[in-house]
Amino acid sequence: MTIYGVGEEMRTALITGISGQDGSYLSEMLLGKGYEVHGLIRRTSNYNLSNIEHIKDRIHLHYGDIENENHLCSILHEISPDEIYNLAAQSDVGVSFQIPEYTGLTTGMGVCRLLEAVKRFSPKARLYQASTSELFGNSPAPQNENTPMMPTSPYAVAKLYGHHMVRVYRESYGLFACCGILFNHESPRRGLNFVTRKITHAVAEIVSGKRQTLWLGNLDAKRDWGYAPEYVKAMWMMLQRDEPEDFVIGTGETHSVGEFAEYAFEVAGLDWLKHIEVDANNLRPNETRLLCADITKAKTLLHWQPDINFRGLVNIMVDADLKRIR
Ligand code: NAP
Ligand code: F7E
């Protein structure tokens, strides 16, 4: 494993999706290691950089879009990154059923555009692609790097395209490109549309008397939920290895949405059954029912394993939302 040490030249990293949950934690981690950090952001009518507000003076932001290959080429040409982390995506699985074509263009074709740009302008850079446990669909748990991939949503199909394109570019052009097959990872910076944050945010609003009810969908779906700051470390570790390889990253523990809600309400001293209602609008046309990671490869070759378990994660998220609202 190559670890860049004191006295070595400053490393440069480019992060697409820098304003998202993972992009923000990854930026903090890379800054801490002395990297020059660049990030791709989209122009939006409403300012949406709250996750990176606290570090914005220490990073270099470039307007752009994963859909624009020419612009990706210009950025790579300009900054010559040593490492590239492709986190940009339409990442909401439920929404991908409503906008399948757009999801394919960003989450899938975006990877192809970036790979082409890397091949032409940064062939020596190391590339991390954000693959996902959604690739496994309803393949039996626990899932590892050899589990058949059977996606059950437009999001997962788009990610599967990206996943295979990374392999094809690695094998065909010798790029140092690898995929992290990450299971769900959450934090106080998780978007409010994802179920964990939707729950912990609602708990805080109910505690403060702003509302009484939380409307959810499928309470029986099971996920392997970990803590995002630990997962971005795994991304970096994959790029420090001598050979590019894909790794499954998760906790190996699985819980239902109902269990998450029950414990989150309990942490705040509330009875979840008094506050949860099911709204059919939150159900999906198709569902991944049971995801649970087998992280034997990551433990053995990457020497990575998580410290924060399910209850620890819920505590962190509920505490943060309660603090925010007080
Ligand atoms: P996130 O919070 O939704 O962040 C996604 C980022 O992508 C945002 O910064 C977003 O910018 C940007 N983006 C979206 N469309 C773009 C486009 N067309 N061009 C450029 N940037 C664009 O996601 P996350 O949770 O940090 O996840 C990071 C990556 O890992 C995603 O690719 C996700 O699919 C994947 N992943 C996540 C998990 C998880 O559990 N968190 C698990 C496995 C894989 P805007 O703010 O402008 O929308
Ligand atoms: O749903 C169920 C829902 O939207 C989790 C993304 O980061 O992780 C994420 O995708 C489960 C599903 O995350 C509600 O049906 C019930 O079974 O929080 P989620 P996700 O779909 O697992 C993967 C690994 C990624 O790669 C994605 O980018 O919770 N659920 N009730 C609900 N989900 C939502 N959003 N809202 C509900 O009210």
Image (cartoon, rainbow, N blue to C red):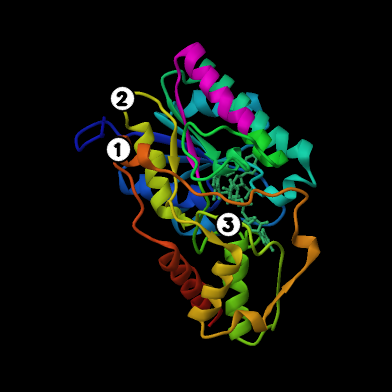
Residue at horizontal 52%, vertical 57%?
Answer: 51
Residue, disc 1: 300
Say if 182 sits above or below 224 in the image: above
The front one of 220 and 112 is 220
Where residue 113 appears, as percent x and y from the top left, is 62, 25
> Disc 3 designates what residue?
222
- Tell me which label, 1 or 3, sits earlier in the chain: 3
Q: Earlier in the sequence, mark 2 or mark 3?
A: 3
- Residue 295: x percent and y percent? 40, 43
Which of 224 and 314 lies nearest the eye of the viewer?
224
Name the kind of residue labelled 3 in the image: Lys
Query: Can residue 159 be seen?
Result: yes
Q: Is residue 204 left or right of residue 8?
A: right
Q: Main secondary structure of the magenta part?
A: helix
> At which x and y percent is residue 171?
48, 15
Q: Nearer the viewer, mark 2 or mark 3?
A: 3
Q: Earlier in the sequence, mark 2 or mark 1?
A: 2
Q: Amino acid at mark 2?
A: Asp
Q: CA distance from mark 1 to mark 3?
A: 26 Å
Whether 252 is among the magenta residues is no
- Classed neighbour count for the residue bearing mark 1: other residues with Cα under 10 Å, few (<14), some (14–19), many (≥20): few
Residue that mark 2 sits on: 242
Task: List x then y, in percent, for residue 25.
Answer: 44, 52
Q: Which residues are magenta?
A: 160-182
- Ligand 2 located in image quadrant: bottom right
Residue at 42% of width from left, 41% of height from top? Answer: 37
How many C-alpha atoms fall within 10 Å of the one at disc 2: few (<14), some, or many (≥20)? few
